[in-house]
Amino acid sequence: MKTQYLGLEAINGPLVYLKTPKELSFDEEVEIILSNGEKRIGNVITLNEDIAVIQVYEGTSGINTKDVKTELKGKPLQIKLSKEMLGRFFDGAGRPVDGLGELHDYIERDINGNPINPIARKYPRNYIETGISAIDGLMTLIRGQKLPIFSSSGINHNDLAEKIIRQANIKDDKNFAIVFGLMGAEYETAEFFRKSFEESGILSKVVTFQNLSNDPSIERILMPKVALTCAEYLAFDLDMQVLVILTDMTAYAESLREVSTLKGEIPSRKGYPGYLYSDLASIYERAGMIKGKKGSITQIPILTMPNDDISHPIPDMTGYITEGQIVLSRELYQKGINPPINILDSLSRLMKDGIGKEYTREDHRKLSDQLFSSYSKTQEVRALAKVLGEADLSELDRKYLKFGEEFENKFINQKQWESRTIEQTLDLAWEILKILPKEEWDKINE
């Protein structure tokens, strides 16, 4: 039987305070019922002998301390799950916002999920083709991997996210789905993605969760857990290969800091809570593959680096948890290169285990090593050219400059609607590499 309590002790931002009932438990779902009948969900985040603290995910606007009821649910926060979710749009709490009504044939599941036992994990193999040469050729996304994208303010990473969602696929496996989580975005951004999904014909394989900038910021704390619970259902119940894209994790961390401040917790670096690392890990570590299960969860979290600072706590801690990163370059973005991926600052630590003759092509690994090496030498030559001038460079150095220009403009740069297969990507790499004499191919053997 559900129990209701009348009145609250206090309200502070998105937090409400209730005299602790005996039957209340930590992380329990509660429902706040306003005098006009409106209902808002929350959960218990602090449980003391006298006072319980509840965070309300739709915010506390319009709530007073007297004419409000608190209903205890006796269970943690749960979300309705069904295969019907594919092609649908939901808010940050998992409720439909596309006007198509509620789900019919569904199950309910705790949004906190179950941690994957390390012994039960299967090592990620094979790859997901994104159609983007810089990613597929040089920092290949492996199925079951977590590979974040580090962007900066002013760089339109939404174009890259849209391109990956539209083009991503797994060869010979049509049982592929995408879970897309949008946090703190403008309405125009949400519409941009919706129209893209509809026009490109991929809507039927995408589940979208969105928390817009005018929605309560506290709901952003809920959204990644809701999205990943959906992904786990599709992957491990329905045996699907699932790609999860979450943007922007910086908005998530800002909401976490806001709640931490209101709770009076002692701040850590840059004012973020001391548990930021473990909180991010609880999200990122929900990617992977499980022995005995056919499905997989691959995760691409996208975050904005404040002030282009890669040592900021959010990208810094993300880099420790995940298996590599894709870094976007402001310099390339200003040159008009799209996507503006900084090759030398990016890497995929699991790439070596999902490419080669068995998965992509026999020459992939050596060719990738050579491109990294040659492009690194190009940066050295460019620095030298700024000192001496191009006229005083050797013939070989000028070839490196030519290689760098072609590599950026033809290999990294792609038209928004251009999708390349892995074969086209590798063939293009060979074509550009031929600008350099074979004596410079030090990473490639006969």
Image (spheres, rainbow, N blue to C red):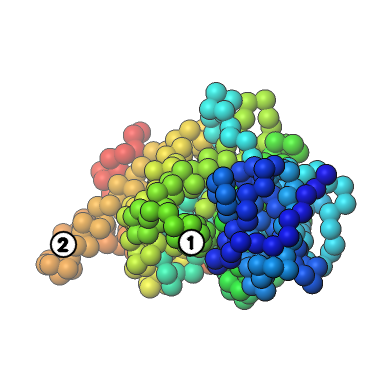
Q: Position of residue 257 (x, y in %)?
A: 46, 59
The residue drawn where x is 66% and y is 56% is 42
Depicted 165 relative to depicted 126: above or below: below
Depicted 352 relative to depicted 54: above or below: above
128 horizontally vs 355: left or right:
right
Q: Amino acid at mark 1?
A: Leu
Q: Nearer the viewer, residue 353 or 325?
A: 325
Q: Position of residue 158 (x, y in %)?
A: 54, 66
Q: Nearer the viewer, residue 222 or 307?
A: 222
Q: Position of residue 50 (x, y in %)?
A: 57, 49
Q: Nearer the viewer, residue 366 or 109?
A: 109
Mark 2 against mark 1, which lies toward the viewer? Answer: 1
What numbered label is drawn on residue 138? none
Q: Amino acid at mark 2?
A: Leu
What numbered label is drawn on residue 262? 1
The answer to which quarter of the image holds residue 438 is top left
What numbered label is drawn on residue 384? 2
Q: Quadrant of the N terminus?
A: top right
Q: Is residue 374 visible?
A: yes
Q: How many marks can you see?
A: 2
Tell me the element at label 1.
helix
Does label 2 or label 1 sit earlier along the sequence? 1
Q: Is residue 83 visible?
A: no
